[in-house]
Amino acid sequence: MSEGRAEGDNLGALENIRCKLDYKKVEGYSLDEQQVSCIENDTMNTLVVAGAGTGKTTTIIGKIKWILKNWFSKRQLAQKSTEPPPKVLVVSFTHASKDELERRILSEILQDDLVFKIYHPGDFVKVETFHSLALRMVKGLNFEDFKLEVSGFEGFLKNLMESTTATDAPDLALAEEKAERFSHLYSLLQNYHVSISSLQRLVREKFHYFWQRDELQKLQASLLELEKYIRGYQESLKSTGSVDFPGLLEIAKTSLDTNFSYDYVIIDEYQDISPLEYLLVKSLREIHCFKLFCVGDDWQTIYQFAGSEISLILNFEKCWGETKVFKIERTYRFPEKLAELSGSFIMQNRAQLMKQIRGKRLDEDDQVVEINGPSERTDLNALYYFLLSLPMHAKIFLIGRYNFDIRKISHCEYLTVEAYEDKFLITMRERPDIQFDFLSAHKSKGLQADYVFIINCRDATLGFPSRVEEDELAGLVRELAILKLSNNKDTGGRFQFLRDFLWRRKPNDSDFAFSEERRLFYVAMTRARKKVLFLTVKDKESPFILELRENSNLKTYYLD
């Protein structure tokens, strides 16, 4: 925007805008004391630990309004000052959350046309994903013939395996499972800067006894196959002049544009940050010392298999320096009995930040319910009359531990399940107004429904919690990361906390046994606005369910 346009402002317009930028009220809702307190804080490093449904996005919007309001106030005092507003970068992790943040931020700030008389908000606030941020930075460096490989290593593997695998379902399912496993390993190798050759050496060192021969051969075969796929993938990238997302982050981190600067960087869902993403922001800060405002919930860290590192939020101050920590503990999503039960459940993980989530008051007694029947078919069918009694246009989530748990719904007599690509259309003939959605626990994060049914609450290998052991190779990647951090003199002790945390993450460590599964179960149950129902089978109940039965807020109904 031109200076001439800015100089044409009048004080009356400025005052009008300043009053409209009430950061204590966002999207028609008044913020609570905890939200206002963290918004008004202006230290270099701020961590806002916010529980599920506590208004994380609302708080971020309030912070941006506070920043803009302060600038208007200073401008008004200076009268003819043409100092531009501070530049704000908001970073999220997915395109869906980025688009939602951008829409809500701009619609809230652009409530009045008078704002345009001062400055277009899109000029001072920018919303990015980590990958779009890195892409914009790299493109600004004028890389020739730059191409981004969006589908990544997993997409490469799936295409390769689909072209070489028989068309029958079992073979395709195994191929998809292998593609997913290898893509997770590749992600960990990239995030922790571990080479496939060093992983091969470690395997030979740890499995050298004769009685380990079979396991050694198995791991070596997996590594040889993984190495082959990685080599093919890298050759594919090279032949097309492309870079994938991990490579993009590396380029952006090491080739920063010195003109790329912000006064505030706000990171949403900070608990999902990976070491690579952390180092990118760290590198940016070395160029321009911006104020950091991070909002996240360590209770919802559920993507460690894909590279997220929970220690980066648990040890925030060690990462960034002196930090002011705030908590937002009033949820506007789920009722008080579910808040109490879910909070006590998640805090069985000792390596979590303490919060006291307060839920909303509902008159209904049965807010958390277990339906225990002699079979999965029985308990689903028993819900027929409950569904008939629901208010019009109720929204229901059916949440399983895995995507394939949809099969447990298909035998329900009153529900019709139709598959459309990667989605399912679920309908009830007697209640066509009810909106049903099936989701895996991972895909449910960030969403909400009136009623949540959690299925597959069984004590089984593929139950909830899943008893599928962590990929042994993934554990070895983390072990190599420990050794690398221990021996790297360039880290200057900055990653000591990460090394220590990784070192403690052992399968038998009580702090970490089922820790991520517990967080995943917590995420699933806290999607409910009114009621959550656990569907269980007699004598096959999940250990999580047996634990919840000790809480008086859970009502269990046994079916004959």
Image (cartoon, rainbow, N blue to C red):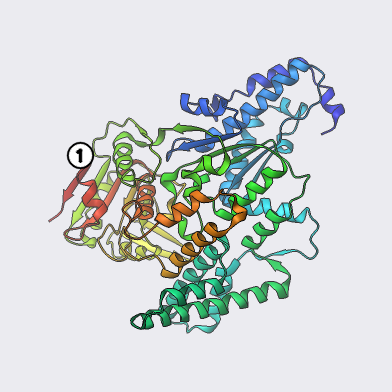
As drawn, the residue found furthest toward the left would be 560
Identify which residue, 473 or 516, lies in the foreground: 473
User: Do we see residue 433 in this rendering?
Assistant: no
Q: Is residue 212 left or right of residue 281?
A: left
Q: Secondary structure at mark 1?
A: loop
Q: Which residue is mark 1?
A: 552
Q: Please provide percent x and percent y for residue 150.
A: 63, 63
Residue 299 lies, with reference to residue 464, above or below; the image says above
- Viewer-nearest residue: 393 or 523: 523
Asked where in the image residue 15 lies, by quadrant, the reply is top right
* Percent coordinates x, y for residue 444 in the rendering: 43, 52
Looking at the image, which residue is at 40% across and 77% down? 207
Label 1 neighbourhood size at 10 Å, few (<14), some (14-19), many (20+)? few
Residue at (84%, 22%) from the top-left corner? 8
| Residue 381 appears left or right of 252 | left
Q: Please name the residue shown 19% across and 44% down the image.
A: 550
Assign the C terminus to one quadrant of the image: bottom left
Q: Quadrant of the N terminus?
A: top right
Q: Which residue occupies 68% across, 38% down?
A: 289
Residue type, label 1: Ser
| Res 155 quadrant in image | bottom right
Instruction: Give coordinates of residue 209: x percent, y percent.
Output: 37, 80
User: Is 364 above or below relative to 491?
Assistant: above
10 on left or right of 524: right
Q: Evaluate whether residue 454 shows in this view.
A: yes
The relative height of residue 400 versus residue 111 in the rendered view (above or below) is: below
